[in-house]
Amino acid sequence: MNVVQSVDSVALLPAYLAAGTAVLVLITDLLVARPRATIAVAALGALGTAVGSALVGAGAQRRTFCVGADCSWIFGGRAALVGVVVALLTVGVLGLSVPALRAGRSPAGEYAFLLACSMTGGVVLGAAGDLITLIVALETLTLPLYVLVGLRRGSLASAEAALTFFVVSVVATTLTLLGAALLYAVTGGLHLDRLGALLAEQSELRDLPLTTAAVAVLLVGLAFKVAAVPFHAWAPATYDGAPLPVAAYLSTASKLGGLVALLAVVQRALPADQTGPVLALLAVLTMTVGNLVALRQRRTVRLLAWSSVAQAGYILAPLGALALAAGRTDEARSAAYAAAVAYAVFFVVLELAAFAGVTALRPTGADGGTVDDLRGAARRHPWRAAAFGLALVGLAGLPPGLAGLFAKVTVVRALLDGGAAWLALVVALNAVIGLAYYLRVTAALWAPEPVANPHGGGAAAVPLVGVVAVVLAVATVAAVVLGVAPQLVLDLAGR
């Protein structure tokens, strides 16, 4: 047997670019020691990674690190979509971080290096073809975030958030590894496609109690990563304690990575009749609890955090259709997977725009403050508030936020095609509940200004750094473009 493998370096180009960005950032910080140069190198490297991912994904699917028909690296349209989105989110978060980094609230070199390392994990995650690559990529995406959350100097809340995030993530990783080990014990395979084929062809394996335990433990471990209820408690405290740009990254790139990992094992490895009921229950609990608790929030970032939990429920909802036989046909499954990925892309763009809006409306280095701190913001900063309001309306699924509207329509359509009309009804009801807090925040932007604000953020002028303005504008334009041409995302998500 020939054990020498050829390596397709073109397929690996996005990973090379992402990892090379992290190395270049480290070298630049060491030799130049200028924050502006370090951030510029990180941003250019991330843009290069996005371009590389798009170019490689534009061609036919490429595979490497293969043993027979089983490959550990599979780069196609969906992997390219994930790579482009993660890289662009990294650029956006770097832009939002510029004011705080200039003020010296966090060390620029370490900050940019950790973001580049996390981006590398996200890029690799989209192309993972086996459980080892998948878990290593997911941890590469997550590990730098422990430090980023607690990197703000002199902040007790930031340190507490980092500790909470670390402890919960260790538990989640342990469960994910245990589930993968149990699956290997049952099947003797680690490649996702081989696992799926073995469990589909050998019903005796699927009926083993050990297989059921492996599937359950693996799903629970990955549910932590997407902050699905009841594995969500870490998210609000972590988001609120982290610097605003890091909270934006957690709510977008990190959540997208968790979804990609969950979708990979559900679509290609695990039996649909076992995962479907679990995912349907998680979706209902997640969207309902997230929306109900968000109604009571007064702090802006905590409200966005609970909103993010609810949005994770909408993302999981199409996968819940696998609980029914009608939802397990090839056509229905393809529609469900595409709907989940497309919704996630629409969501992360709108979520980034929302965090950019909060950053633009708050003083440099400040936290998200309360909803009352944003009262009357539209009178002082009309276009910033308009962009923030558009993002909130989009997350609610109302026009003119067409990206959010089409996202919810896509989910409902996939559920109806899969025979899960009851779950589509739950999605619709939760969307109505979500209107209350999204519109409450939007209305506060145009409400009369408070006479005196004890938090100090109300009537004070907020200078807008040019880079933050660019991020806010680009995220808003991207949300508008995706809303006008949603089929582009759906086509890529279905590949």
Image (cartoon, rainbow, N blue to C red):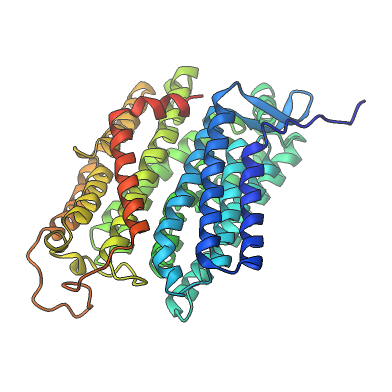
Residue 461: where, in percent of width, then height? 20, 71
Q: Nearer the viewer, residue 153 or 285?
A: 153
Place residue 41 in its image quadrant.
bottom right
Q: How far across and how far down the image is residue 153, in percent?
A: 48, 78
Q: Nearer the viewer, residue 403 or 26?
A: 26
Please state the horizontal and vertical placement of residue 56, each as a whole percent of the image.
59, 30
Q: Nearer the viewer, residue 474 or 166?
A: 474
User: Residue at 19% of width from left, 57% of height from top?
Assistant: 441
Outermost residue, right side? 1
- Quadrant of residue 99 in the image? bottom left
Please say if 240 is above or below 93.
Answer: below
Query: Closer to the camera, 186 or 253?
Result: 253
* Quadrant (top left, top right, bottom left, bottom right) of the N terminus: top right
Q: Residue at x 54, y 40 (%)?
A: 83
Residue 166, relative to residue 86: is it above or below?
below
Find residue 205 and report its horizontal and vertical position in percent.
Answer: 69, 31
At x 83% / y 30%, what residue is drawn?
A: 5
Whether residue 128 sits left or right of residue 280 in the image: it is right
Residue farthest to the front? 32
| Horizontal side, residue 114 vs residue 338: left or right | right
* Residue 42 in the image: above or below residue 268: below
- Residue 67 seen in the figure: yes
- Is residue 274 visible from the viewing direction of this image? no
